[in-house]
Amino acid sequence: MNHPNSLMYTSEHEWVKIEDNIATIGITDFAQSELGDIIFLEFPEIDESFDEGDVFGTIEAVKTVSDLFMPISGKILEVNEDLNDVPENVNESPYENGWMVKVQLDDDSSTDSLLNSESYLKLIS
């Protein structure tokens, strides 16, 4: 299973990549493998704001629907519209083509609750 060291993770199986105060967020390779074939995703609106822990969307697989939890506080800048047509990108490429949203971090947003790859691997093993 692939869990890049350069990313941060949540116990709810989202990954976070922060560059220049913008967080790119998706679900982990472990999460997509547990869900199975992804068939539909529901995303928030651009400019919608969320606090850490808020539900920001849903992900539907063949046999289940799961909430997506915001790992940091911020405002939605972009959603991966490609996933509307090719939701299987989440399964095939969770860290590249399967990203879900880009978020402008709030000034007071903290990454203290995020896990490094080693801690995340311990969580899922």
Image: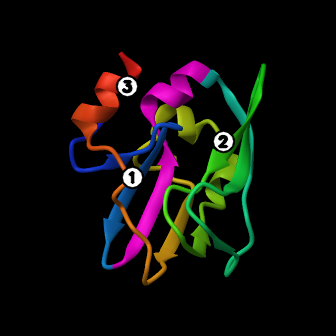
Q: Does the magenta stretch include residue 24?
A: yes
The residue depicted at 57 percent of the width and 20 percent of the height is: 34
Q: How crowded is mark 3: few (under 14 residues within 10 Å), some or many (20 or more)?
A: few
**Dot 3 corresponds to which residue?**
123
Point out the stretch of residues depicted in magenta: 21-34
Identify the mark nearer the N-term, 3 or 2: 2
* Residues at marks 1 and 2, CA–CA distance in whole angstroms: 28 Å
Q: Which amino acid type is shown beneath numbered disc 3?
A: Leu
Is 87 left or right of 73, judged from the image as shown? right
**Residue 80 in the image: above or below residue 116:** below
Which one is closest to the eye, mark 1 or mark 2?
1
| Closer to us: 89 or 122 | 122
Q: Dot 1 corresponds to which residue?
A: 113
Locate residue 33, reporting x and y percent.
52, 22
- The residue that appears at 47% across and 37% down in the rendered structure is 11
Do callouts 3 and 1 mark residues in contact (Cβ within 8 Å)? no
Marks 3,2: beta carbons within 8 A: no
Question: What is the C-alpha distance between the residues marked 3 and 1?
Answer: 14 Å
Front residue of 121/36: it is 121
**Nearer the N terminus, badge 3 or badge 1?**
1
Question: Where in the figure is residue 94, as x and y percent of width and height?
Answer: 46, 40
Give the Cα distance between marks 3 and 2. Answer: 26 Å
- Residue that mark 2 sits on: 87
Query: Dot 2, crowdedness within 10 Å: few (<14), some or many (≥20)?
Result: many
Left or right of 12 on screen, residue 43: right
* Dot 1 or dot 2, earlier in sequence: 2
- Residue type for callout 1: Ser
Residue for point 55% across, 41% down: 89
Question: Up-down: is 11 above or below 55?
Answer: above
Circle 3 SS class: helix
Mark 2: which secondary structure? loop
